[in-house]
Amino acid sequence: MSDPIDWRRPHPLTVVVLIVTFISGNAFPLIAVVAFGGGGIGFDTAAVLAGGVTVGFGALGWFMTGYAVTDEAVHYRSGVLNRQARSIALSRIQQVSVSEPVIARAVGLAVVEVAEASSDGDIEIRYLGKPDATALTERLRSLARQREVPAMADGVASSLAPPPEPPAVVLHTTSTGALIRYNLGTVVPGLTGFAVAGAVVVAILALGPGLVAAVPAALVVAGVMVLAATFSTLGVVLTNGGFRLERSPRSLRVEAGLLSRRQVEVRPERIQTLTVSSGPIVRRMGLHQVAFSAATGKASSQNNAIVHLSPAVSTAEVAKIVQGSVDVDPAFGVTLEPVSAVTVRRQLARSAIAFVVVLLPLSIGLWFVHPVASFLPALVFWPPAVWYARQRFGRLGLSIDDQRLVVRRGVLNHHLTQVPLSHIQSVTTRASFFQRRLGVCSLDVSTAGIGPGNHVSVPDLTASRCRDLAEQLSNAAASSRWELRA
């Protein structure tokens, strides 16, 4: 018989956090009220009434909110006018995470998020004191582990609870310097394109109006580039600063964030996809990202930006992190099967369409300036287009063994993704009009993961090979098990 439900309310300072969050999110209207108050149109009265309603609903919402944990489930109820109640069985918990938004962190509060695999099954308990949030998180994780039924050697389930879990081991911490180098290396290609466009504008101004107009334009271009790099890097550091990855026998724990601190615990066997990525500049620096997609519900996907085993790690450490986290090799040495060579023709056809739409009018315009100048767009465009088409074919590839699917893709940004066969939810073959004319199709493999990494796509396989792979993957997914090596 389950224990009686002992309902508890969030921390009383929740009301303060809700009010401050409302004020910060409506700063401009409130400033307008203050600025135009006294104008005889009732703005001051409206401001007082709005503030009273906000405080009243915040206090009433706190009073009407409750959470409880029993031996079978975690319960949550909330709402003032529309009441909502949600329960998640302990055996269905996918992950329990803690986040500390800036305002809540300032007063020592945190959010506890309990996720299951359904699209609307998450529970967010806002807000608890940091000690209470930590205690609740550890209790839920412990109870969820106790609901696991270990199998005996003869296949009969054991009624014994799992032994106490030893302390977690720190696998990796990402330094602030590595985050800054990785982000700067990532934004350099985009900034380079902006710099080239700016240089063209500056040159035109220098040849026309003269240096009086060209110098300020050059300063503006340089200033925009510096600001873009600075704000982009600052955002990455604030989001992933203090990154820490820990491993225990049954789970991975990730913490990240300087202002808003987030903590996520993920079961290794519930990781749906694992991707090692790098851009052209950061590869020269010997840096990579290792990202994962896990089967979590809606709240976690919206509020947890943690999707990395490492946001910036050296090439030599990638294998250590992947093997230490999910007990599989990073698939760097896997022999990959190429796609159809027709993909080169298809990519060149795309380039031809882009040339006709964008650059052909420019070539016609240059003809009236000088006949030879009309060939400049083609000379600039087609060599990189041919190179890209050939490189795209060379980079695309896949491999299947008895446990996983490995897909490699990307010309400038390289991605190597592996998917456990037992986590494949659906396999889809699709072919556009032009693909059908060329006798090729694309293969899409989807998992239960949340976010852009929840599926992988292999384009331009021959039609027969695409159908064979779809059948092979479907059969393997139905009959395989993804087991961690000891």
Image (tube, rainbow, N blue to C red):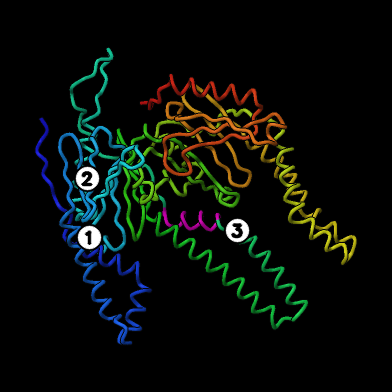
Q: Position of residue 35 (x, y in %)?
A: 35, 83
Earlier along the polypeptide chain: callout 1 or callout 2?
2
Q: Are the two marked residues, 3 and 1, in contact with CB atoms closer than 8 angstroms?
A: no
* Helix, strand or loop status at disc 1: loop
| Residue 46, quarter of the rendered image | bottom left
Q: Amino acid at mark 1?
A: Gly
* Helix, strand or loop status at disc 3: helix
Q: Which residue is mark 3?
A: 190
Q: Closer to the camera, 354 or 166?
A: 354
Viewed as shown, does residue 131 lie left or right of 294?
left
Q: CA distance from mark 1 to mark 2?
A: 26 Å
The residue positioned 20% from the left and 48% from the top of the image is: 77
Q: Position of residue 401 (x, y in %)?
A: 51, 23
Local packing at callout 2 (Cα closer than 10 Å; few below 14, some 14-19, many 20+) is few
Q: Which residue is mark 1?
A: 108
Q: Is residue 259 visible?
A: yes
Which image quadrant: the N terminus?
Answer: top left
Q: Amino acid at mark 3?
A: Gly
Q: Which mark is residue 85?
A: 2
The residue positioned 22% from the left and 45% from the top of the image is: 85
* Helix, strand or loop status at disc 2: strand
Q: Is residue 127 magenta?
A: no
Q: Which mark is residue 431?
A: none
